[in-house]
């Protein structure tokens, strides 16, 4: 039966690896069980952190797309405002020559 559990703390698992390594005196198979348990625990923690990072990246991409959309909309509105301003300037000064 496996006496090591991935829910144990990292320190407990590292202590188990150290004590079994000291006790095995040449038999390298003994510390593999706590070492494998530690790897499972670290793998689970890494997976949880990767999922959290992926969620943050998706949120950042959504905000970036929204900012790009708002920038394009503001550029369009600014261009339209410029066109209206030019046409109003031409109407208010009919006797000036058009240079461009």
Image (cartoon, grey):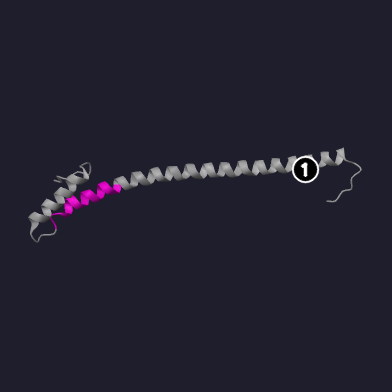
Name the residue furthest right: 95
How would you rate the neighbour count of disc 1 (Cα within 10 Å): few for under 14, some for 14-19, many for 20 or more?
A: few
Q: Nearer the viewer, residue 23 or 71?
A: 71
Determine the residue positioned at 57% across, 42% down: 67
**For residue 80, above or below residue 33:** above
Q: Give the range drawn in magenta.
A: 29-43
User: In the image, what residue occupies the spot 21% across and 52% down?
Assistant: 36
Residue appearing at x 37%, y 47% in the figure: 50
- Residue 62: image location, x then y, percent: 52, 42
Going by the image, does 7 lie left or right of 99?
left
Tell me if residue 42 is in the magenta stretch.
yes
Q: Taking 47 as reference, is 73 left or right? A: right
Q: In this view, does 79 lie to the left or right of 20?
A: right
Q: Quadrant of residue 85?
A: top right
> Which residue is identified by label 1?
83
Question: Which residue is drawn at the image coordinates 42% and 45% (left, top)?
Answer: 54
Q: Where is residue 8 in the image (x, y as percent from the top left)?
A: 20, 42
């Amino acid at each position: 039966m496996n006496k090591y559990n991935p829910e144990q703390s990292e320190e407990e698992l590292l202590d188990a690896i150290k004590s079994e390594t000291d006790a095995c005196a040449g038999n390298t198979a003994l510390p593999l069980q706590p070492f494998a348990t530690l790897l499972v625990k670290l793998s689970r923690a890494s997976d949880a952190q990767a999922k959290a990072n992926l969620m943050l990246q998706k949120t950042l991409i959504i905000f970036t797309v929204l900012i790009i959309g708002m920038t394009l909309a503001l550029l369009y509105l600014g261009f339209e405002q410029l066109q209206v301003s030019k046409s109003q300037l031409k109407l208010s000064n009919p006797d000036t020559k058009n240079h461009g």
